[in-house]
Amino acid sequence: MSSWPSNPKYISGSVKRVDAPAKVTGRARYASDIQAPGWLYGMILRSKWPSAKILSVNLDKALKVPGIKAAVAVRDAPFNVRFYGEEIAAVAGTSKQACLDALRAIEVKADVSKDFVVHESDAIKEDSPRVWEDSANAGAPRAHNKGDAESAFSECAAVIEGFYTTPVLIHNPMETHGSTVSWTDEGVTSWASTQGISSVQDGLAGALQLDRSRVRVLTDFMGGGFGSKFGPGAEGVLAARLSQQAKAPVRLMLTRFDQNLAVGNRPSSFQKIKMGATSDGKLHAFQIENYGTAGIGAGGDSGGGGGGANIPSPYLYKVPNYRVSQTSVAVNAGSSRAFRAPGHPPASYGMECAMDDLAVKLGMDPLEFRLLNDSSEIRQREYKTGAEKFGWKEKYQKPGSSPGVIKTGIGCAGAAWPGGRGASYTTGEAQINPDGSVEFRLGVQDIGTGTKTVIAVVAAEMLGLTPEQITVKVGDTNFPPGPGSGGSTTCPSVSPVVYDICANALQQLQAKSGLPDARGDNWFPACKKLGVTPLKVSGQWQEGLASGPAYGVQFAEVDVDTETGLVTAKKIVAVHDCGLIIDRLTLASTINGGVIMGMGYALYEERVMDSLSGVVLNPNFETYKVSGISDMPDIEVVLINMPERGVVGIGEPATVPTAGAIANAVANAIGVRVYSLPITPAKVLAALGKVPAPVPS
Amino acid sequence: MKKPEEEKFGIVSRREFIKGLGVTAISTVAAQTAAVAQELEKANAEKVIGPGAVPVTLSVNGQNLQLQLEPRVTLLDALRNYSSLTGAKEGCDRAACGACTVLMDGRPIYSCQKLAIEAQGHQITTVEGLAANGNLSPVQQAFIDKDALQCGYCTPGFIMSVTALLQKNPRPTLAETKHACSGNLCRCGTQPHILQAVFQAAGVSMADKTEVIKHV
């Protein structure tokens, strides 16, 4: 078993992001910046109906628009569309303006007499219109049980019941989905904004019926994905078909509207929870009935990273008696995709709110109640460390006892993430040149978490060089393959591979140069002995250098204005176990990002559907509110360095507990529970009895 | 407390303009609408350009860009798709995200909301124009030092907003900094590090918010 160096120079330090200079100067070329010679602009025509049978798509007039070089329908009519925003056709031309004109010139005939349903609470009813003709909207509930929940409730000293709900969220990465695709006789090249170059390669090869070796995917820089950018998508395939027809490269990036309609979302959850504890404060009985929607994709269990609506339950806690029943409900809306820690943020929210509500009923401090019921040693330690940093004991007051109009409250919540240990199939290579320069090549991509920096840090450490002396190349399917950037796997996937490449390189250099140790000062003399032939070394993932699962806890302090209902997050303390920290600077960025996204889930974000027209009412940044810089709380990140665990991924656990912690802080401040995310001013005022409850949409 | 200075729109402030429009004034204006439209049409008759492409000269980062553009092409579109200056990013194309922020005569603007033909005769600065002779600006350097970026797609927009802020106000408060960056969105969640970077660039030190605890 391999092990990491014990007194590292760069590992666990604060190395600046190696591609930051390119990003701050505008030199970095993102997928949407690619200007291939002779490139054309591409755009998509989308359904304006939530459900329709497309009878014909006539592209003749569009093809006559000046500047238009290609136009394709997604498939031969007739075909069905099942949500507002589904792809119908696409055009490519010499300018965006030409494409806009051409989209207007496409003639679509459709039978729009079909009924539709866009809200899961309607879709779950027996007499609801069907999204798919041949199957009911709601699948048979999935059940899993332990002990005898029914009779266990009668043995409890306190029982709470609550209906905790979470909305559909949109990923909204700053760079929309899309790519530039060039399809020539040699094959297909796709410069894609993706978090999975290999999965885009597979997807394009499959859709275009090409040999995988004839599809090359390149991603130097990409502008965020959060789980929504693994495959080529309909837009990637359409770009390829347009390129084939136009005999020119086509850049097809989605508009922000497109992005909000058709390329994924986090499923909703409607969690009816009943939970009880014995008089000594031990959880004894638990019951949940949950449903949520994954759009037209009914989806399955999403605990491991899929896109379905089911959630892991009873989540972090070992309850001796439980009954879990949940189902995914199809509606006429875009299909869900993996969204940062699939299943876990809603699971944490529902369970952690129920924990606080039960603690209140038992008359216990919610933190003490957790310490009594959470069997994870690591989380126990995180809770204790975090409570001290946060000042939990000094700050905790009984719910609703904060004086004045603006009430302060605190809350906490925990996270788990089963992944994090990396993909054992990851490979990589390095080319070492006689002049001592060295280039690492891995078929992964940097989604913004700092993958290139991680590779440089590990390589510099192992070879005794500086990170600046390491050239890192990723984002090319011609390199040895690695996993997609998802599930907190990239850092623990690439770090062991780079370790192995370096170990192999040093061994071979030693043999070729005769020098006993090729590291540090000996590096350049050793490389010189290579003569004229560069040394190519490959490496594999190694057991013992990375592990999982990941844990984490967060504490939140909020102000709630009881006159306006406005919630302000004041402070978040995020405590996470990181195994061996590779780069402290980029790690802190990832955790900040998780917290801020979690805050958006708690307070601001929600896709709003209109049941009469079936459209998404807020498909842009003016109406879909993400956290802005003025909303920022004071975020303190506490990293527990555990080198003995090896590298552990952090992207998912960082966002899991935030919403639960904030929701609990709000309940602690005002003394009543707001049962539904996002916690808007209207819902706060309704919970306080100052305004009528909002009519559920 | 001193009243904030009212923002001027041209020569009259918005308040003065609205004050000047009494009810009578508005009804008079309504009655005159047709006449005004006719006048405008006459006045603009010689100036109508497009809809086809017309020559457009933009002064970007101190250099002239000679382009042929339809009048409906935005400044952002002109930069990204008719020149190789792709530093300004398109995030929404409707004045909601700030990724396209550039400076026009030193003021930050959303380049997606400015027609290229309107930007003629103004000095445009994009993120590519900040590093003089390859030396990064203090703002760019601070973004690197504080890791004020993740995927980096919003970064050029933030850097332009911060550059404009510090030119006008070299020692901004936290509230002023947040206000200046309120028109820029970041989805990765780099805002805490951006605030740290602004303070570094302004020469003010800010406490590190990250702590590492060794496991025993």
Image: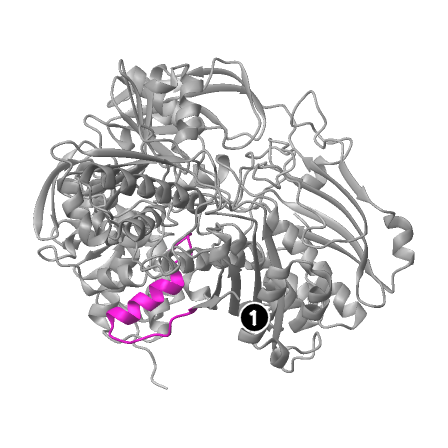
Residue B80 seen = yes
Q: Residue A302's spot in the image, x, y percent? A: 61, 39
Residue A15 vertical position relative to residue A119 in the rendered view, above or below: below
What stretch of residues is rendered in magenta?
B185-210
| Residue of label 1 | A385
Left or right, residue A563 beside residue A18 = right
Out of A273 and B206, give the one closest to the viewer. B206
Out of A424 and B216, give the one closest to the viewer. B216
Q: Chain letter of disc 1?
A: A
Residue A295 picture quarter? top right
Colour setup of the view: one colour
Q: Residue A335's spot in the image, x, y percent? A: 56, 34
Residue A231 picture quarter? top left
Out of B82 and B152, give the one closest to the viewer. B152
Residue A242 vertical position relative to residue B9 in the rendered view, above or below: above
- Number of numbered discs overlaid on the protein picture: 1
Q: Residue B193's spot in the image, x, y percent? A: 36, 63
Residue type at the position of mark 1:
Thr
Q: Residue A462's spot in the image, x, y percent? A: 31, 50
Residue B35 seen = no
- Residue at point 65% right, 58% down? A376
Residue at the bottom extreme of this rendering: B1
Left or right, residue A192 beside residue A109 = left
In the rendered structure, does residue A264 fall within the stretch colored magenta?
no
Residue A233 vertical position relative to residue B45 in the rendered view, above or below: above
In the rendered structure, does residue B200 fall within the stretch colored magenta?
yes
- Residue at point 49% right, 32% down? A85
Residue A294 vertical position relative to residue A369 in the rendered view, above or below: above
Left or right, residue B142 beside residue A420 = left
Residue density around tag 1, few if under 14, some if 14–19, many if 20 or more, within 10 Å: some
Label 1, secondary structure: give it. Answer: helix
- Residue at point 73% right, 59% down? A354
